[in-house]
Image (cartoon, helix red, strand yellow):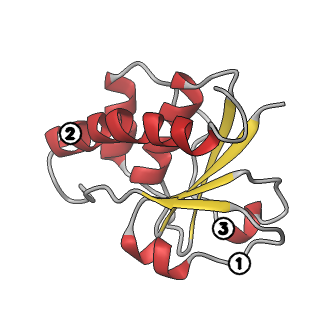
Amino acid sequence: MNKTVLVLCTGNSCRSQMAEAILNHDLAGQIRAISAGTKPQPRVAEGAIEALKLANLPVEGLYPKDVDEVMNETIDLVVTVCDNAREACPVFPRQVRTIHLPFHDPHGEPIESFVRVFDDIRARLVPAVRAALEPHDVL
């Protein structure tokens, strides 16, 4: 049974969306990643969409979601990717492991910044999720 990983951010429009796509691609068949925000924005940032497309990752179905929309999911791991989300992290219906892995917010910056953040997420988040879930299941 695949583990479900929730990537939590404030706006759920950039870092958490890229993280969701990266995890679902790089750990396909091992986990299911979803993302949400504590104060979701109206749409996914264009720079995030562009960075995902440059990496040939799918962008269909990505949209900002409020964390309340995923509270009934069976979540095995929560990853907060910004300090605000860590501070506002909700209490889940059952105990769930949480790790904090902050990433730079490239909003308002050129596409190169989004690509750098994408690369940073891929380099640090994938192994962190593997490590966080290893004591429970071997990925």
Residue at 41% across / 18% down in the picture? 56
Q: Earlier in the sequence, mark 1 or mark 2?
A: 1
- Measuring from the top left, give residue 26's x and y in whole percent: 51, 23
Q: CA distance from mark 1 to mark 3?
A: 11 Å
Residue at x-position 31% and y-position 38%: 118
How many numbered markers are drawn?
3
Q: Which mark is residue 91?
A: 1
Kindly report which numbered mark, 1 or 2, lies closer to the viewer in this rendering: 1
In this image, 30 relative to 72: left or right?
Answer: left
Whether residue 130 is situated above or below residue 40 in the rendered picture = above
On screen, residue 130 above or below 6: above
Report how far apart the C-alphas of labels 3 and 2 lie in the structure. 26 Å
Secondary structure under badge 1? loop
From the image, tell me which residue sits under label 2: 116
Residue ID at (16%, 54%): 109
Provide residue 65's location: percent of width, then percent of height.
63, 60
Q: Position of residue 12 (x, y in %)?
A: 50, 60
The reply to whether callout 3 and callout 2 are in contact (CB within 8 Å) is: no
Residue at label 3?
67
Q: Type of residue at label 1?
A: Val
Quarter of the image where one finds residue 4: top right
- In-image side of 49 versus 77 (left or right): left
Mark 2 packing: few (<14 Cα in 10 Å), some, or many (20+)? some
